Image (cartoon, helix red, strand yellow):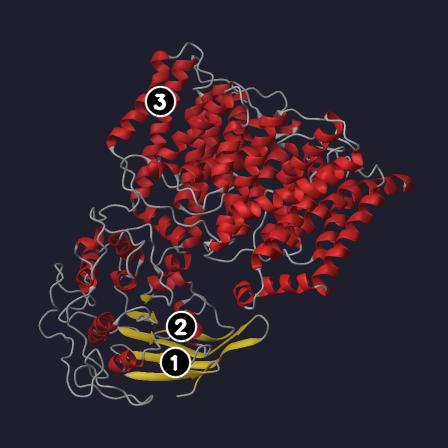
Amino acid sequence: MASLTYELTLAGLAVGSAAALTGIGLVVTYRATGALNLAHGAVAMICAYVLRQLVVVEGWPLPLGALVTLLVVAPGIGVVLDRAVFRPLAHRGANPAQALVASIGVFVLLVGTAVLLWGPGARDDAPVLLGDDPWAQLGAVVALACLVGAVTRWTRFGRELRAVIDNRPLAVLSGIDADRVAAAGWAFGSFTAGLTGVLLAPYVRLDPYGMPLLVLEVVAVAVIARMRSLPVAVVAALAIGVAQAQLTRLHPEGWAGPLLQAVGANLFVVALLVSALVLPGIGGKGRDALPPPVRSEPLPGGVWLVVGVLFLLPLGFAGPDLHTAIQVPALSVILLSLVVVAGRGGQIALGQAAYAGLGALFTALLAAGGVPTLPALGLAVPLVAGVGLLTGWPAIRRHGLALALVTLATGVAVSRFVLTQPYATAGLSLGRPAGFTDDRAFYALELLVLAGCLALVAALRRGRTGRALAALRDHEPGAEAAGVAVPGLKLLAFVLGAALAALGGGLLGMGLRAFDPEAYDPVRGLLWFAAVLVLGADSLLTPLAAAALLTTLDAGPHAGAAAAALGLLAALTARVPPLTTLLPGARPGGRGRRRGGRPPTPDDVVPSAGTAAVHPPSGADGAAPPAGGPAPPAPGGAAGPGGRPRPTGSRTRPRAAAPATAPALPGVAPAPRLRADAVTLTYPGGVTALDGVTLDLAPSRVTALVGPNGAGKSTLFDCLAGTLRPRRGSITLDGTDITDRSAPARTRLGIARTFQRLAVFPSLTVEENVRLGEEQGHVRRDPAAVERSLRLLGLAGPVRHETAAGLPTGTLRRVELARALAGQPHTLLLDEPAAGLDAAETAALARILAALAADGLTVLVVEHDPDLVAGIAHTVHTMEGGRIVS
């Protein structure tokens, strides 16, 4: 027994050493560049193939082949990736999600290249570099980790690396060549990938698909190390490797025995799933989501007519065998799920292949149990949707890179523990429904299903849910502030995506007349994701074109051509626009953009001085408030830009035009009172941002918060809006504690906000931005509120049909304010609303805010413009050091 334990420990150390090398490379690359390199496993596979080519095929001596592979080829790949792919992204200010997409593109490109050069088959004659002694491998890992630690701690390059990690812009200003540091990081990361590949190749299946995925699984050790600590990564890799080896001695019996054995044999997959779900995410919120796609005008009907004819051609001109064509509609439905989740929802979903495989598996199981094939597919779809609900629920709170790892781990886990296990799939077959056994009949059925799915997704994209999904994709905090229930919406996208993938997966299995786990391999899921992003993630034409391209190229004589082509385009995603935007009539810009290219002028967006308020409601045509209601004051006396008397210090001064307690309009209830009571908030690290702050906001008054940067103004603002939760104290609305209410819940209670940094949704038009506020806000289902808000802010002209992307800052500020007002709130929180506005726009803003307060709104303004504050504020509070000092 002791001998067996020792032998298993040695085996585990060998596996753990290779995993530790991967962890070291990923951590160093991430620290030097900020990019999570999912192509690490593909680089390892290429280097293993190169060493085999040099030693086995060309007859080079092993030491020479190893030196060329590890010291020339591997670092060279890293330098090429830096110069051609990731450095341009960094110079363009791309977010981490775009770098992640590029790394997925590199992964797919290298896999396709390997298939083209060496074929898809496995090789079992890879040369052994360090022999069978795991202690030699462990020694190499420890030595490499110590070398990296010494270089980063005691050398000039290490100091530069740490400076770039801490603050890249400041490091560049200090004279450090950040590009050189990044290139060194990529070269070293590729070297460790190459070393991992040549060490693993003799002991695992060397093929273009298996090895990259195997190495990708051990990303878990870098996640456990929070992408920072080399010792943690090494220890975690060795511990998981030894534990996985020791678990092989267990042979549990019963129905769960095979599953437990599969878990024990794939412990790195379990570690990746758990670490991605439980540990603090390596990604943030907002900047690491997929960027909004370039909005194009709707495709002309002629394009869809041509597409329809092309899809119908196999029925009339193809021979009796439609084996290739029959896969296209089914794959189109699978890819349509990515249009919903990634294209419209902006979520990095890398596990759709798993849901497609489960759809085929459940259909086959139900059919084997006696259920007719077509009803079996109908039952499988909601079952997989339930799986999507279960797997999506813990994932929806993750963002960006962490979400990508969760979905990837889910896809790999389903493949490893279910789809490829004999206990679940042994002896399964999958036939076609009665009456559709002929290729033509089944192809016609697939086309009907595809048409229905396209119609469903088109309706979703055009409606209220589609606008909310686009808002979630474009600016998640802004969507929350607009009242969008973000967690529920994300869950809806994941569930709908799982259902569509299951439907397509079941159809694909029926078309092939077999359940083939390799058709739903996680690597294929990455290829599908890359294809959808390359062609245009938010276009309904994309799944059709991608499915036809993938199926046709894979059926040709050059296997891997589709992966290589799509991978190259995905790797160059920062330079190459989505291909569907290059079609005739798909000109970027969106509905209603001016043909002459003239940018909006101030006349399009600046309201006149006599514009009426939107709250409380006025006439449906945007006319002035009814007689007897307060009106905007006329300028006079010592006034600011908005014509309001200037306050002195923090003292409250009465207004002739807008008294401290303005009379309510007939039929309008007094606005509730928002209050912060002894609010304290401390950030991690012990920094106290708010220290016992009490603030009372009254209706019909404009309250201003001023103070230096870092005084706590925006933090207090976020606590009032629900973005942050105070550690102590409470937020009340008319005496009701709302401290634990989320930002969307507070929006629906009537508390609207704007952001210091613009929170508009660039892929939506101006009118759609405003309509979203009405649909999700305090008073919903009042379409007239949209028109009133547009009129109030001077957006009712042609500019209403412009997409928000590219509009001037002044226009976008008004769009954001109009969206907040469209929900008819009683309290309006404005965070530096005049930032980026010129004098005329600031004066117009002052008039609008004065009119809103006069109509009974509670207004809080955080602002640095003293003239604006003096012109509109009834009360001014000064904050310093997290306290209100006056």
The residue singled out by tag 3 in the image is 311
Where, by quadrant of the figure, is residue 755 drawn?
bottom left
**Image spot of residue 533 (x, y percent):** 44, 40
Q: Secondary structure at mark 1?
A: strand
Spot the residue most to the top.
320
User: With respect to residue 704, does 448 lie above or below?
Assistant: above
Q: Is residue 641 left or right of residue 67?
A: left
From the image, tell me which residue sits under label 2. Answer: 717
Is residue 477 or residue 125 the one in the foreground?
125
- Image point (55%, 36%), residue name: 108
Badge 2 local density, few (<14 within 10 Å), some, or many (20+)? many
Q: Secondary structure at mark 3?
A: helix
Q: Which numbered disc, 3 or 2, marks the residue closer to the eye? A: 3
The secondary structure type at the circle numbered 2 is: helix
Residue 322 at what x, y percent from top left? 44, 15
Q: Mark 1 highlights which residue?
A: 695
Q: Between disc 1 and disc 3, whose residue precedes?
A: 3
